[in-house]
Image (cartoon, rainbow, N blue to C red):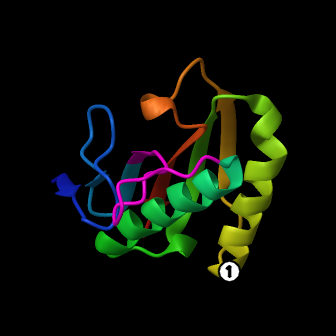
Amino acid sequence: MAKVVNTDKAPAAIGPYVQGIDLGNMLFASGQIPINPATGEMPTCVKEQAKQSLANVKAIVTEAGYQVKNIVKTTIFLADMNDFADVNSVYEAFFTENEATFPARSCVQVARIPKDAKVEIEVIAVK
C-alpha cells in the first residue's frame, strides 16, 4: 500500500506528488527544487541550489525511514546543461559525504524548472 511521505524539512514538490511516495520497499522522492524550507528562499548559484535540492531529498528519504545509501536512481533536471559540471561536483560530494555509492543517474535539460530554479532532483530509493 502506498504511503505519502511529508516533512517540513523539505518543501512540497511541484506536480502530482506531495514530497514522496513510499511503496513499502521503494520510495519515490518527487522533484525537489532548491528552496530552503527554513527560510523559503532559493540560492542563486547553481552549486548552492544543487546542495539545497540534495538536502531536501535527504530529508524526505530520512523521513521515510531510508538512508542516502538506499538511493539507486536519480534524475537531475537542469535549466542549462552548461551547469552540469558544477552540479556534478556537488552530487559527487553529497554521496561521498553520506558514504553511499553513486546511484544510476540521468541528467536532462528542460525548458523551465518551477519557480525559475536552475536544478531540480528526484530519486528512487529501495530497502
Taking the view exactly as shown, the residue that stands out farthest to the top is 111
Please tell me how many numbered marks the rendered image carries. Answer: 1
Question: Could you tell me which residue is drawn at 66 percent across and 69 percent down?
Answer: 94
Question: Could you tell me which residue is drawn at 58 percent across and 51 percent down?
Answer: 73
Residue that mark 1 sits on: 97
The quadrant of the image that shows the C terminus is bottom left
Quarter of the figure with residue 36: bottom left
Give x and y (percent) for residue 83.
77, 39
Question: Could you tell me which residue is drawn at 50 percent across and 66 percent down?
Answer: 55
- Specify the principal SS of the magenta part: loop
Residue 38: say if magenta.
Answer: yes
| Front residue of this view, candidates 71 and 30 | 30
Horizontal arrangement in the rendering, residue 28 relative to residue 83 (left or right) = left
* Part of the protein shown in magenta: 30-44
Give x and y (percent) for residue 102.
71, 63
| Front residue of this view, candidates 91 and 22 | 91
Q: Is residue 102 above or below residue 117?
A: below
